[in-house]
Image (tube, coloured by chain):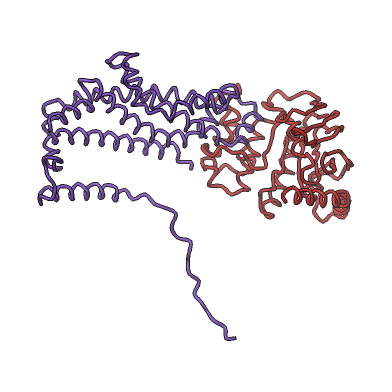
Chain colours: A purple, B red
Amino acid sequence: MPESETNIVFRAGGYAPQRVAWASVATLVLLIALWQACAWLGWMSTAFASSPVAIGRALVDLAASGELWGHLSASLRRLAIGWAIGTAAGLVVGVALGLFTLARSPGIAVVSALFPVPKIALVPLFIIWFGIGEGSKVVTLAFGVFFPTVINTLAGVDNVPRGLIRMGQSFNLRPWSILTKIVLPGALPAILSGFRITTSTAIILLVAAEMIGAEKGIGAFVLQAGNLYDTDNLLAGIVVLSAIGLCISWALGALERAWLRWR
Amino acid sequence: MKSGIGLRVAGVHHAYRDLSVLDGLDFDIPAGEVTVLVGPSGCGKSTLLGILGGLVAPTQGQATMRGTVAADCLNPLTYVFQDFALVPWRSVAGNVSLVLEDSALSRVERAARVAEVLALTGLSAFADAWPKQLSGGMRQRVGIARALAVRPAVLLMDEPLSALDAQTRGLLLDEFVSIIARTGATTVYVTHNLAEATRLGQQIVVMGRRPGRVRQIIRIETPLSERRADDPALVAIEATLWDLLRHDAADADRELADARI
């Protein structure tokens, strides 16, 4: 049989997505431009969905009148306090479940039972318990943030190679050093990816809580605009919420790049 | 200066649930010498090393340490791990420094010790590198540097070269000889490699298949610095070791295959 010669085809490409910063911005710009074009061309009713230009104008007016800052500062304060409390408690409980036999089984049972409960359904209960003021809103956020933080922290602690902990013990490191220099840094990737989930959850719960009972806050503002069929302001509020999400996402990305550069 | 710390293994039995892995071990590990543990897979060599290092509690019997620990020793029984056990989020210097950070050493003393052991292991130029940037051999050098930083009385080395390629193994083995000679630490070295055993061991403890018992203890009096791989006396001892282990190794291998099926 005659010998044949065949080119060897490269087949190991892909499965390695790269970060292309400009593509993220370009996609957003393109979507907004498309939206504006639809409004200009009359392909959508601006009575039901305002155009980006109208939303921009509404935002400028809200900023100039100071109304935006009042709502935004109220929301950001609730978001920061609720998220911080839920995260701190979730980290402590998650680490305890990951490290201590006595905490693990009872703790996982409680977390598994309460995690699937929709936290929005608990807002009326929290209003009864903590009043219509700030307390119920902060508790709603903290409660919603707590469970995903516990679960991600537990997974992170479970994934820390036990060989590293044994190494620490073999060198007589104190338990506090093993926790802060081995366990927590090892669990950090999972904890940070949990932050992405909990910040989004916190924004959703913030809006829900503010819609149920608040005078100030982006959620209350969006609800009020909706009641008045003021789609410019309604969508301006949603743009602000989206901007908050984007800023948090950017900040978390920066934290990941700074703290996980060893990966 | 030779370490004055010797170890004694007295009536040690160990079982993982119903699986007995060590069965009545009794022997001494002389101070300032290298004792090599050899035996077929699963005979309990690493478990015994864990018992000596206080990382495994024996089911019965005990391991004891005899002698006076030097004043500058921060961790008498110090492990060198097979898989290096480096924390990936710390640099080379950070990994070494980690084991000194709970000690009473000042920051300056700590930095001096880190610099000293990095120089001793040829890692000074890599002090700021991440572990992921290093080859396997370099990572194990970091493991050695970290162990030396605490000025150990006893070095417990669990197959420290098994994850490395043959060339790196040869180079590091020579470095081990020089480091052990310089520090004088009592060393317990677990290996499957009989050439390593005869190159390093002043006392070779041959263990039988699971549950591990001591089959024979062989002494080699040739000083470490004078040993050569082609030394006929060492080659003969290697052949003796293989004769002792051959059947057990084959049985252990078959047992492992049966367990997998």
Q: Position of residue A70 (x, y in %)?
A: 19, 23
Classify the position of the N terminus of chain B by image quarter: top right
Residue B148 is drawn in which quadrant?
A: top right
x, y percent for residue A97 = 54, 26
A176 over A260 or under it: above or below? above
Residue plotted at (30% across, 35% down) = A245
Q: Is residue A47 left or right of residue A218?
A: left
Q: Nearer the viewer, residue B41 or A210?
A: A210
Closest to the observer: A248 or B92? Answer: A248
Residue B21 quadrant: top right
> Where does residue A153 sit, x and y in percent of width and height?
48, 31
Q: Is residue A98 left or right of residue A122?
A: right
User: Which quadrant of the figure has residue B116?
Assistant: top right
The answer to whether residue B246 is above or below residue B64 is below
Instruction: Say which of A8 and B76 sits in front.
Output: A8
* Rendered residue at 75%/35% (across/down): B49
Residue in view at x 83 percent, y 39 percent:
B212
Quick check: A79 left or right of A224? right
Where is residue A75? Give x, y as percent.
Answer: 26, 25
Q: Number of marks in the image? A: 0
